[in-house]
Image (cartoon, rainbow, N blue to C red):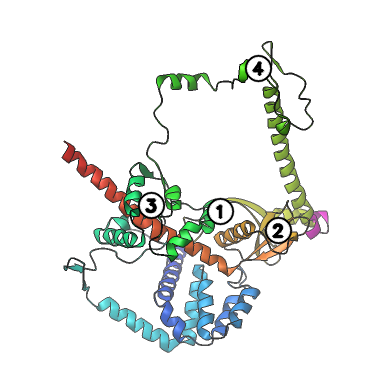
């Protein structure tokens, strides 16, 4: 007998309501956008801040939505900001109160779909296929966020063939055979995970964007780099090479066995390169130079860390007029080493500094701006991606650049296009390539019997 507490039952019911609201709104998105009215009242609700949680929409976001000319465009903008379970629940509740007739029609339509028997659809070879045989619905990164889940979807024969056919139609002549050849010595990486470095690579990859826009395109090798690795990372070594590695790295020999000073263009500042460095009776300026360079690199890193803490300390002092207030503000700052997106678990943000305002409870991302990029009219693209990515993963609407000129940055809804690009890469590039990879593996297994 399993017993649940009242708290457990309430939490279970709340999760069920959240899940139902999200499924309903996503399942009937096009119908809702076309039929909804008076979206401004929904914007008012999503702009309200509760006692324990911030508003779904900031003032700037709400103003952008209200500026749209039609109700359809406004509702499309609202959908772009439904990035949490609470947002879905509030929107569903508003629809039930404001559009009861539409909700009733959609619920009746849903019931009719559930009662309808599974039907068959024609296949290329003329045979009918039962749609209940495979999960033919295209997945998304909310539900298929691991290699195992994606492989399960790809492994269905119908899905696999469909993905391979679509990819072959998309690629140029000879590209499919070239892809198979590249996959022969590959294996999957251990996990499907995206951080800021991967997101930047995807956002800036022009071959990927060309692949989505044109027929006969080249397969974007970015997918191979991100999701696959070589079956044998290191080549086989000879016995002599293995013995050399055990003995440690060999000293680089200079011409005629001489130990010369480093060239003038790479000589270290503040180092007297004319003085020899004596080792076992021999002079070696190179070792002396390398040691000094290592020390200077370490010193630069220490200075950079000190400068970052100095800027943070100044920001705290400016916000708190007294030492006691400054201590309280510092206590509201936390460093979150790894943050996982609530809806998309494969997106991770690392080493995020977050400030929670003690008065309003509003959370802000803090980024130290030692290069003073805030002084520029337009922020560099890589800084904008970093800020928006951290805000998106953490569910925060604003970030502050702390430097000589502090600057508050609001989350840009257009960043959702970058996340969609990542999702398309996984589903429309990696998914088909995984199907091809599994076919290559199958052909290799079958060849064992033929060779035997």
Q: Residue at x 29, y 50 (%)?
A: 438
Image quadrant holding the C terminus, namely top left
Task: Identify whether 403 is placed above or below 441.
Answer: below
Disc 3 or 4, which lies upstream in sequence?
A: 3
Q: Marks 3 and 2, how far apart in space?
A: 36 Å
Name the chief secondary structure element in magenta.
Answer: helix
Q: Residue at x 40, y 75 (%)?
A: 24
- Badge number at residue 196: 1
Q: Using the image, tell me which numbered label, if any, was put on residue 147.
A: 3
Q: Earlier in the sequence, mark 4 or mark 1?
A: 1
| Residue 401 badge | 2
Q: Pointers 3 and 4 in contact (CB under 8 A)?
A: no
| Kind of element beneath mark 2 | strand
Q: CA distance from mark 4 to mark 1?
A: 47 Å
Gap between marks 3 and 4 measured at Cα: 55 Å
Measured Cα–Cα span from mark 4 to mark 2: 52 Å
Q: Position of residue 334 (x, y in %)?
A: 65, 53
- Are the two marked residues, 1 and 2, in contact with CB atoms closer than 8 angstroms? no
Is residue 201 or residue 28 the one in the foreground?
A: 201
Q: Nearer the viewer, residue 219 or 24?
A: 219
Q: Is residue 447 visible?
A: yes
Furthest residue toward bottom: 101
Q: Residue furthest right?
A: 322
**Residue 89 % position (x, y):** 48, 74
Seen in the picture, residue 279 relative to 81 is either above or below; the reply is above
Q: Are marks 3 and 1 in contact (CB under 8 Å)?
A: no
Q: Which residues are magenta?
A: 317-324
Q: Nearer the viewer, mark 3 or mark 4?
A: 4
Residue to which mark 4 is pinned: 258
Q: Select label 4 or label 1 by which is in front.
A: 4
Q: Secondary structure at mark 4?
A: loop
Q: Secondary structure at mark 1?
A: helix
């Amino acid at each position: 007998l399993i017993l649940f507490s009242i708290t457990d039952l309430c939490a279970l019911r709340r999760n069920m309501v959240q899940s139902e609201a999200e499924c309903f709104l996503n399942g009937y998105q096009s119908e809702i956008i076309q039929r909804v009215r008076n979206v401004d009242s929904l914007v008012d609700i999503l702009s309200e801040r509760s006692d324990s949680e911030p508003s779904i929409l900031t003032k700037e976001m709400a103003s952008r939505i209200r500026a749209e000319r039609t109700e359809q465009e406004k509702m499309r903008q609202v959908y772009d900001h439904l990035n949490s379970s609470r947002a879905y629940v509030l929107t569903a509740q508003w629809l039930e109160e404001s559009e009861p007739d539409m909700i009733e029609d959609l619920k009746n339509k849903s019931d009719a779909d559930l009662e309808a028997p599974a039907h068959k659809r024609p296949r290329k070879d003329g045979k009918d296929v039962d749609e209940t045989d495979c999960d033919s619905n295209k997945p998304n990164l909310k539900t298929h966020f691991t290699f195992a889940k994606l492989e399960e979807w790809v492994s269905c024969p119908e899905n696999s063939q469909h993905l391979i056919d679509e990819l072959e139609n998309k690629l140029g002549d000879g590209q499919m055979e070239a892809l198979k050849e590249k996959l022969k010595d590959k294996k999957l990486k251990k996990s499907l995970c995206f951080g800021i470095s991967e997101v930047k690579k995807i956002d800036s990859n022009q071959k990927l964007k060309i692949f989505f826009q044109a027929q006969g395109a080249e397969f974007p090798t970015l997918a191979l780099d991100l999701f696959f690795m070589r079956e044998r990372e290191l080549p086989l070594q000879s016995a002599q090479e293995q013995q050399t590695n055990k003995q440690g790295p060999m000293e680089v020999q200079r011409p005629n066995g001489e130990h010369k000073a480093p060239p003038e263009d790479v000589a270290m500042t503040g180092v007297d390169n004319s003085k020899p460095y004596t080792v076992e009776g021999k002079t070696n300026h190179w070792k002396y130079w390398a040691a000094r360079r290592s020390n200077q690199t370490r010193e630069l890193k220490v200075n950079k860390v000190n400068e970052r803490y100095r800027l943070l300390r100044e920001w705290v002092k400016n916000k708190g007029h007294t030492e006691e207030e400054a201590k309280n503000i510092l206590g509201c700052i936390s460093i979150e080493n790894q943050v996982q997106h609530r809806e998309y678990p494969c997106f991770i943000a690392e080493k995020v500094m977050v400030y929670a305002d003690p008065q309003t409870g509003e959370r802000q991302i803090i980024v130290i701006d030692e290069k003073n990029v805030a002084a520029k009219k337009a922020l560099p693209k890589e800084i904008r991606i970093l800020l928006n990515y951290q805000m998106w993963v953490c569910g925060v609407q604003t970030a502050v650049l702390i430097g000589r000129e502090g600057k508050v940055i609001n989350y840009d809804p257009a960043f959702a296009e970058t996340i969609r690009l990542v999702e398309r890469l996984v589903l429309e590039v990696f998914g088909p390539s995984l199907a091809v990879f599994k076919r290559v593996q199958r052909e290799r297994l079958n060849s064992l019997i033929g060779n035997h």
